[in-house]
Image (cartoon, helix red, strand yellow):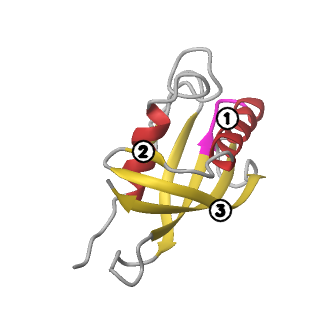
Amino acid sequence: MTTYVDAEGAIKTWINAQTTWAAAPGTAVPKGAHLHRLRSPLSGSYILLSLLNGSTALTSEVPFFRARISGQVYGLSKEQACAGAVAYANAIERIHSPVQMGTVWCQFVADVTGPRDLSDVGVEPRYVVDADFYFQPV
């Protein structure tokens, strides 16, 4: 049997439930996580999630779905983008045991790289954090 995982959707759901560092006023990422760029954000920062690569499916021989996810943190200022990226990197770096993300379990996160400043590429200040997420269905 083959099972696919919506890694981006699962991580988005998890981030948007984190009211201590994301998705709430006064936090490092008050606009939460999204799968599409926001138009003209008036305040705060947000995370744009995208799948870079990963395994194609879970099978009985390979019980994990690995997804390399890029989290680009946009802000109105470089300081906002950096603070959001640091908060996101710290949060995912701490996932070493199973955490429910939407309808799947993230068993652990590995190979976190960043935050890396990409502010001089494009118009808006932005930092990027990439990581490997290992999922299993609930």
Rendered residue at 63%/52% (across/down)? 96
Circle 2: element type: strand
Is 131 positioned to the left or the right of 119 in the image?
Answer: left
In this picture, is 58 found above or below 48?
below
Q: Position of residue 116 (x, y in %)?
A: 76, 54
Q: Give the residue pinned by disc 2.
A: 100
How far is disc 1 from disc 2 in space, using C-alphas?
22 Å
User: Is residue 135 among the parts visible in the rendering?
Assistant: yes
Q: Give the residue pinned by disc 1.
A: 84
Q: Position of residue 84 (x, y in %)?
A: 67, 35
Query: Are the residues at dot 2 and dot 3 in contact (C-beta closer than 8 Å)?
Result: no
Q: Secondary structure of the magenta portion, mostly?
A: loop
User: Which numbered disc flags the more N-terminal residue, 1 or 3?
Assistant: 1
Rendered residue at 71%/41% (across/down)? 90
User: Is residue 35 among the parts visible in the rendering?
Assistant: no
User: For residue 94, which quarter of the picture?
Assistant: top right
- Inspect the image, locate mark 2, and give the three-letter code of the amino acid beneath it: Gln
Q: Position of residue 17 (x, y in %)?
A: 44, 30
Category of crowding for the residue at label 1, using alpha-carbon neighbours closer than 10 angstroms: few (below 14), some (14–19), many (at least 20): many
Magenta-colored stretch includes residue 9: no
Is 12 positioned to the left or the right of 30 in the image?
Answer: left
Identify the magenta region. 73-77
Is 113 positioned to the left or the right of 136 in the image?
Answer: right
Category of crowding for the residue at label 3, using alpha-carbon neighbours closer than 10 angstroms: few (below 14), some (14–19), many (at least 20): some
Is 75 positioned to the left or the right of 46 in the image?
Answer: right
User: Which numbered disc flags the more N-terminal residue, 2 or 3?
Assistant: 2
Circle 3: element type: strand
Tell us which disc is closer to us: 1 or 3.
3
Q: Is 101 or 12 nearer to us in this picture?
A: 101
Circle 1: element type: helix
Rendered residue at 61%/40% (across/down)? 74
